Amino acid sequence: MLRWNGWGEEATIYPLPASAARYLRASIGEGRAVPDVTFERAIASVGASGLVAHPAIRTDSAERFHHAHGQSLQDWVSMRAGCFAPSPDGVAYPATDEEVRAWFEYARRSGARLIPYGGGTSVAGHVTPRAQDAPTLTLDLSSMSRMTGLDETSRLATFEAGATGPQIEKQLAAHGYTLGHYPQSWELSTVGGWIATRSSGQQSYHYGRIEDLFAGGHVETPQGILDLPALPASAAGPDLRQMILGSEGRFGIVTRAILRVQRVPEVDRFHAFFFHTWEEGADAVREIVQQGIPVSMLRLSDAEETVTTLNLSGKDRAVGWANRGLDLLGYREGRSLLLLGVTGSRAIAGAAYSNAKVVMRRHGGLPAGETIGKTWRKNRFRAPYLRNTLWDAGYAVDTLETALPWSGVLPAAAAIKNSIRDALASFGERALVFAHLSHVYVDGASIYTTYLWRRGADPAETLAHWHAMKAAASCAIVAHKGTISHQHGVGLDHAPYLQAEKGETGMRMIESVRDALDPGRILNPGKLVD
């Protein structure tokens, strides 16, 4: 059973080691474990439904509360404090294209607004209802999770939009294939959500981002059906797939996706390297990518994340030995950890590792074997569960990300981290801030920043601290001409900064497509554009 007020399955616990607790106390102070409300108290905040009655709509308070939030920090504060306003007025579970189409007609007749809902994993407010005069109906697509076709000759698989990462991989594995799209939310997020927010998986350098994997599909819009043929390439005008990618449920609801799949690889390994500095590591990563060496992942942690990762592992003895060994070898304060993935045939993976190692040694990289990589792989989908444990211990944690050309990556990373620290310092509090380069390209890289801080004395204080840090970091991103979102979409949280990236003309283009496909503003109000 999924948690009602946190991440993931109730049965999965990610304990906080004693050494990690000591590290957090030393870094940012004693956590404030403010009691949260009970589930009974939380659902008491759900008011009466304003929807026109329908036998397929669930209007009980528990169902509506479960669909009132994603996983943004604002959502967390609201669900833990039991103060959601508003919740959706009802929830429906369409199982076919025709049923989705019927809900459009219901919305037109009743004046309702519709929010498409996949796995509820959004960290930017995509599924959170807005306060408005019209009632809201959430369409949960979890009943649409089948693989409906597999063209092995073309390596194209068709999935219904509600399929989660595990459901996709299980159905493909039965035929010897994989999609290879592994965002950290993989266990719960859906292919429809990936498309709607332009998701990126952890091994996107090998498998591709979702826009590379999304070959075509079927979209239900308020103005009619939009079928996107799966063509390898086309010069027939603008690519309509690109209009649906990242559209966040404003243009229509994706009900089926045709995806490019691969054979399950012979080799899928993760190796660790240490660098004297983050800067030297970044130079090595950039050279590997620009040489075209076919690795599958390059994840480079800064010094703060390297130290924090080791301290949060709970393996005190092993970490102590590792630190002493690295010190003796000259990898002291400021050292940076790189995880290198190699995926594919044995020959290609072996050659990729050998060639990458040559580059890394030229930049001072020290090979550290596969143990760290195996541990990371084992825990990569468990890491979000630590958020539950940290909250209970009195700490809040959030992430944000951007991408920009190589020439601006390191200056932007420093500015983002400093902006978060300075914003919280204005409240007399300390933030633990660290970052890594999570996705790399020939011309640039993404910066993924994590920040932890003590919860406030009450929910309003925690939220005020978050607003200050989020705004400061977003302004730093805009000032350094980075994208406001590399992989988490826009939703509510990033909408104020979108025009700085798209410009006035670009915003009018987005709005005109929305008006053409949804002139009645039925779909997901306030997200992406308002």
Image (cartoon, rainbow, N blue to C red):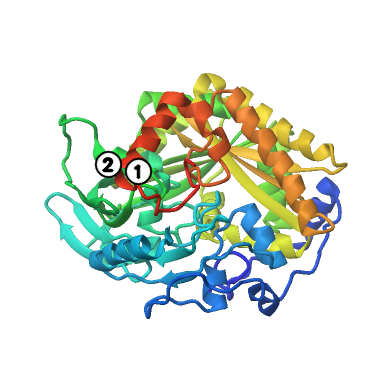
Which residue is pictured at 55% across the width and 67% down the height?
Answer: 8
Crowdedness of circle 1 by 10 Å Cα count: few (<14), some, many (20+)?
many
- Residue that mark 2 sits on: 241
- Estimate the x, y position of residue 235 in percent, counting from the top left: 16, 29
- Label 2 with label 1: CB-CB less than 8 Å: yes
- Estimate the x, y position of residue 487 in percent, counting from the top left: 47, 42
Give me the C-alpha separation between circle 2 and circle 1.
6 Å
Q: Nearer the viewer, residue 265 or 430?
A: 430
Q: Nearer the viewer, residue 56 or 19?
A: 56
Amino acid at circle 1: Leu
Which residue is pictured at 71% across the width and 46% down the height?
Answer: 466
- Estimate the x, y position of residue 370 in percent, counting from the top left: 51, 49
Q: Secondary structure at mark 2?
A: helix
Which residue is pictured at 66% across the width and 42% down the height?
Answer: 305
Q: Nearer the viewer, residue 508 or 17?
A: 508
Residue 2 visible in this rendered orientation of the protein: yes
Label annotation for residue 245: 1
Q: Is residue 506 left or right of residue 476?
A: left
Q: Nearer the viewer, residue 291 or 214?
A: 214
